Amino acid sequence: MDQDPIIVFVCEHGAAKSVIAAAYFNKLAAETGLSVRAIARGTNPDPQLSPTTVAGLHADDMLPTNPFPQKLSPADVESARRIVSFCDLHREYQYNIVIEKWDDIPPVSENYEKARDAILKRLSVLIAHL
């Protein structure tokens, strides 16, 4: 069975930026008819999602893609069409794949709306190029 191509969003804790990016990417991709889906991962995942992120997504009528942060695995990287990283990736994850770094996104903990809007701006460009 063929699977839709995957975009992997990665942040250090897998609890905030990658979660927002994956949720909004999946919404926007569905709205535009793209057969690509996104997942959120962390290089050093927290035990739970950021409460600020969960509250912000709920206020936006959105849900996180996972109920808790998940660690980035070699299988995630190998199956990815593209990786978007909000943090530095360990060398072991730097395969021959496109890795796009979005290190200019403000902290979600300081201002969810500002971080979300910066992510949405980047997502619109990404989706336009897929």
Image (cartoon, grey):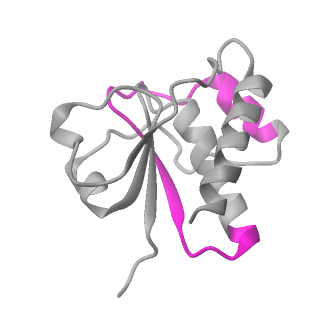
Furthest residue in direction top, as rendered: 110
Left or right of 95 in this view: 126: right
Count the numbered circles shown. Answer: 0
Q: Nearer the viewer, residue 123 or 24?
A: 123
Q: Examine the rendered structure and indicate whether residue 41 appears above or below residue 87.
A: below
Q: Examine the rendered structure and indicate whether residue 75 appears above or below residue 121.
A: below
* Quadrant including the N terminus: bottom left
- Residue 44, position in %: x, y? 32, 26
Residue at x 60% of width, y 53% of height: 126
Residue 79: within the magenta?
A: no
Q: Examine the rendered structure and indicate whether residue 58 appears above or below residue 114.
A: below
Range of residues picked out in magenta: 30-58
Left or right of 108 in this view: 37: left
* Quadrant including the C terminus: bottom right
Q: Nearer the viewer, residue 35 or 39?
A: 35
- Residue 57 occupies quadrant: top right
- Residue 109, position in %: x, y? 65, 15
Residue at x 51% of width, y 25% of height: 103
- Residue 98, position in %: x, y? 36, 52
- Residue 97, position in %: x, y? 29, 54
Residue 42: within the magenta?
A: yes
Q: Examine the rendered structure and indicate whether residue 111 appears above or below residue 19.
A: above
Q: Nearer the viewer, residue 96 or 16?
A: 96
Residue at x 66% of width, y 51% of height: 125
Residue at x 34% of width, y 26% of height: 88
Furthest residue in direction left, as rendered: 92
